[in-house]
Image: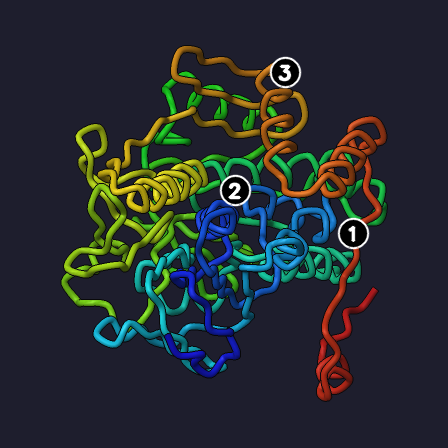
């Protein structure tokens, strides 16, 4: 095998190239590194992101470093693992070669685990003006916007203009939307009255808009109803059976003619697979996912696999594909690694079968909903379960410790000192600031 041109040394071991360092890619790389393979892990970032806690970064509840883990640190002692920080631009399945911004690389086995991005369902204006939350960078951008608008609000005497700055609309009633709404409601109740004493926080309205007839559609009716009850007690305005058609930066337009004034829309209404050139067109199915068989092999290709959110696999219990959640990605990675081990021993591969471990969502302190295969419960105990599951799912003891300390401190003090507006400096920053309208006080 050639050394290619991103400086990966030749090896006698088969080379497996993994594109994506999320839950699927990272778990597969970890397991394959203990076998007789040369493992090349490619990601556009040099860190793994713990997506379930992005909303806490956006709400100034956690530091970004607490939910990120350097890829190189995890594989420091694995001499057969090579990490490259770049973007894959194309796959050549005939030549068994990938092309990246750094150059090309041959592979024996290719695993695509590039995850999913926000789905705006073709609405370009919403895509430009709404705030998604699929990366830590997007979470920080949202945090900056929320805090900056509150700074502007205290100098704005016009009521309607101030409402646009302080009111927030969340679109999507899944776990992300519910958790963001709960966090914002608690910020309104406990934090903002202390930080912005000049602002009447009773004026702040938090809307949760859901196109369907219930929240947390993938969970039990009990969880859905309890989540709705929790949010209403926190003061969140819930609009079910309401489909957002447009957002012009000032008003959210809902099907039927209703308008909600708000300068900020948090979009948590759906996801679609990231794209990669070079795969057969007929392997891309609904939601830009890649069709795979029960061994996660891409339809019509040999030695090319897809894992996690990007993979669309049908099995008897999931005829419309698996839910795009972390547990599917982790279990698929484990199964594929085991199949490589079985094949090396001349044994047949094992078809993937998803084991649903349950679903959960938190709605602020002391409130959560948990659906396990045999039990369903809500309230304080569910919240404790949610905390421990997410805490021990983090990579790195240091991250777990810092998150635990943050949570304990926040629980007893109702406060955090992370409400910082951090913006990158650019040449036009002074010019932009000078153009900001000055409000009369």
Local packing at callout 2 (Cα closer than 10 Å; few below 14, some 14-19, many 20+) is: many
Secondary structure found at label 3: helix
Q: Which of the 4 quarters of the picture holds residue 135?
A: bottom right
Local packing at callout 3 (Cα closer than 10 Å; few below 14, some 14-19, many 20+) is: some
Image quadrant holding the C terminus, namely bottom right
Q: Residue at x 45, y 79 (%)?
A: 3
Residue ID for mark 3? 380
In the displayed structure, does residue 281 sit left or right of residue 150?
left
Residue ID for mark 2? 207
- Residue 260 appears anywhere in the view: no
Q: Position of residue 394 (x, y in %)?
A: 63, 39
In the displayed structure, does residue 359 sit left or right of residue 346?
right
Return the residue nearer the eye: 86 or 433: 86
**Label 2 to label 3: alpha-carbon separation:** 24 Å
In the displayed structure, does residue 130 sit left or right of residue 191?
left
**Label 2 to label 1: alpha-carbon separation:** 22 Å
- Residue 156 appears anywhere in the view: yes
Local packing at callout 1 (Cα closer than 10 Å; few below 14, some 14-19, many 20+) is: many
Secondary structure found at label 1: loop
Is tag 2's residue or tag 1's residue first in the polypeptide sequence? 2
Q: Position of residue 88 (x, y in %)?
A: 42, 73
Residue ID for mark 1? 419
Q: Position of residue 189 (x, y in %)?
A: 73, 34
Is tag 2's residue or tag 3's residue first in the polypeptide sequence? 2
Is tag 3's residue or tag 1's residue first in the polypeptide sequence? 3
Q: Which of the 4 quarters of the picture holds residue 415?
A: top right
Return the residue nearer the eye: 26 or 400: 26
Q: Residue at x 55, y 47 (%)?
A: 51
């Amino acid at each position: 095998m050639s050394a290619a041109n991103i400086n990966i040394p030749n090896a006698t071991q088969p080379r497996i190239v993994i594109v994506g360092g999320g839950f699927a890619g990272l778990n597969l790389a970890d397991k394959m590194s203990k076998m007789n393979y040369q493992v090349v892990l490619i990601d556009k970032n040099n860190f793994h992101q713990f997506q379930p806690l992005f909303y806490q970064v956006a709400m100034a509840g956690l530091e970004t470093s607490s939910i990120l883990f350097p890829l190189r640190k995890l594989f420091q002692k694995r001499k057969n693992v090579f990490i490259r920080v770049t973007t894959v631009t194309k796959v050549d399945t005939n030549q068994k070669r990938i092309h990246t911004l750094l150059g090309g690389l041959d592979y024996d086995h290719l695993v695509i685990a590039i995850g999913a991005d926000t789905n705006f369902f073709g609405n370009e204006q919403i895509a430009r003006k709404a705030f998604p939350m699929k990366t830590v960078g997007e979470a920080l951008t949202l945090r900056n916007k929320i805090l900056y608008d509150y700074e502007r609000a205290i100098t704005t005497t016009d009521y309607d203009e101030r409402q646009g700055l302080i009111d927030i609309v969340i679109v999507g009633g899944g776990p992300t939307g519910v958790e963001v709404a709960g966090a914002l409601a608690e910020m309104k109740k406990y934090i903002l009255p202390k930080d912005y004493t000049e602002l009447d926080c009773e004026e702040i309205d938090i809307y949760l808009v859901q196109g369907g007839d219930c929240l947390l559609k993938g969970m039990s009716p009990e969880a859905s109803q309890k989540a709705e009850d929790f949010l209403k007690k926190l003061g969140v305005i819930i609009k079910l059976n309401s489909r957002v058609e447009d957002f012009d930066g000032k008003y959210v337009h809902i099907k039927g003619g209703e308008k909600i004034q708000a300068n900020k829309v948090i979009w948590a209404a759906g996801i679609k697979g990231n794209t990669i050139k070079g795969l057969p067109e007929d392997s891309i199915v609904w939601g830009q996912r890649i069709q795979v068989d029960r061994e996660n092999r891409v339809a019509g290709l040999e030695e090319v696999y897809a894992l996690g959110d990007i993979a669309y696999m049908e099995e008897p219990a999931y005829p419309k594909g698996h839910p795009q959640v972390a547990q599917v990605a982790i279990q698929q990675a484990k199964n594929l690694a085991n199949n490589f081990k079985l094949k090396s021993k001349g044994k047949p591969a094992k078809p993937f079968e998803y084991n649903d471990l349950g679903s959960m969502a938190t709605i602020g302190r002391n409130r959560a909903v948990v659906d396990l295969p045999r039990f369903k419960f809500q309230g304080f105990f569910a919240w404790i379960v949610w905390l421990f599951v997410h805490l021990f799912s983090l990579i790195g003891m240091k991250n777990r410790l810092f998150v635990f300390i943050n949570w304990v401190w926040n629980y007893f003090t109702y406060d955090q000192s992370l409400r910082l507006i951090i913006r990158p400096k650019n040449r036009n920053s002074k010019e932009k600031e000078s153009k900001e309208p000055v409000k009369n006080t």
